[in-house]
Image (tube, rainbow, N blue to C red):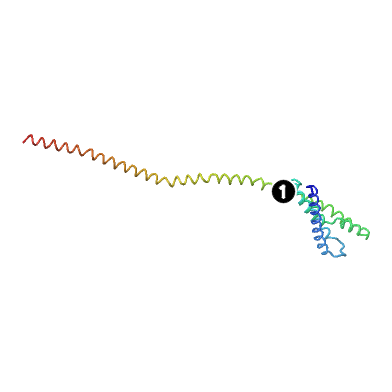
Amino acid sequence: MNSRTRVLLQSVAAVFAGGSVGSLIRISLSKLQAPDASWPWMTLLINLTGSFILGCLLEYLATTGEDIGARRIWRLGLGTGVIGGYTTYSTFILETDTRITGHAVALALGYLVISVVVGLFCAGLGISAGERLGNRRNARAASLPAAQSVAQTIGASTPTVDATAHGADDGPNATGSAGNGSASNDNVSSGNAGNSGAPDAGHAAARANAQKGGRS
């Protein structure tokens, strides 16, 4: 099986599964409406919400990436499948025709106009919402590399800070070592000075004794 055939089968499976889910949701909601209701409010609600969701979904997908690969499968499964099975414009046409033939022309025309006009308005709201959501997602995705760059910069500067801290910790020890070295040098210098002074004192004492002997 080549890749084109595999993608086709995946698309068909996604539409079939999504359509089944959407149809089950619509049938469950339709049971909330009385069969003899003069105004088909549940069908109207389903179609209006479906228009909004479909507009939002398609615009979001178009804003955030290309219609290829897995994104295409999701679009077909959710848009064509779930929303296509959820909305029911065939029922909308049937209900309009039933009211016209039942001599409720004004009601049928009102239902027709509201469904189409408000449906377009809801689709426009959905497109606007999908665009905002898509732009927000793109902005977050664009800011992620910048955040990673900042994190890498902070991570790279951490060893420098540690090295500086270690140098500061070693400073007193180095100073102490220098002080000890200076003290040792002072002691050596003092010792040398004392040793060099001892012969001079001996010579002076010998000269004094010689002078006393000469006088006596």
Residue type of the residue flagged with mark 1:
Gly
Q: Would you say residue 122 is visible in this rendering?
A: no
Q: Residue at x 51, y 45 (%)?
A: 159
Q: Residue at x 75, y 45 (%)?
A: 66
Tell me the quadrant of the picture where the C terminus can be found: top left
| Left or right: 150, with 83 as reference point | left
Viewer-side residue, 18 vs 43: 18
Give x and y (percent) for residue 156: 55, 44
Q: Position of residue 82 (x, y in %)?
A: 79, 56
Report which residue position mark 1 lands on: 134
Q: How many marks?
A: 1
Mark 1: few/some/many CA within 10 Å (<14, 14-19, 20+) = many
Q: Specify the farthest residue to the left.
A: 216
- Left or right of 3: which side holds 91? right
Residue nearest the observer in this picture, 113 or 131:
131
Q: Foreground: 143 or 163?
A: 163
To which quarter of the image does residue 111 belong?
A: bottom right
Image location (x, y in percent) of residue 67: 76, 47
Residue 5 in view: yes
Q: Element type at marker 1?
A: helix
Relative to 55, does residue 205 appear above or below in the rendering?
Answer: above
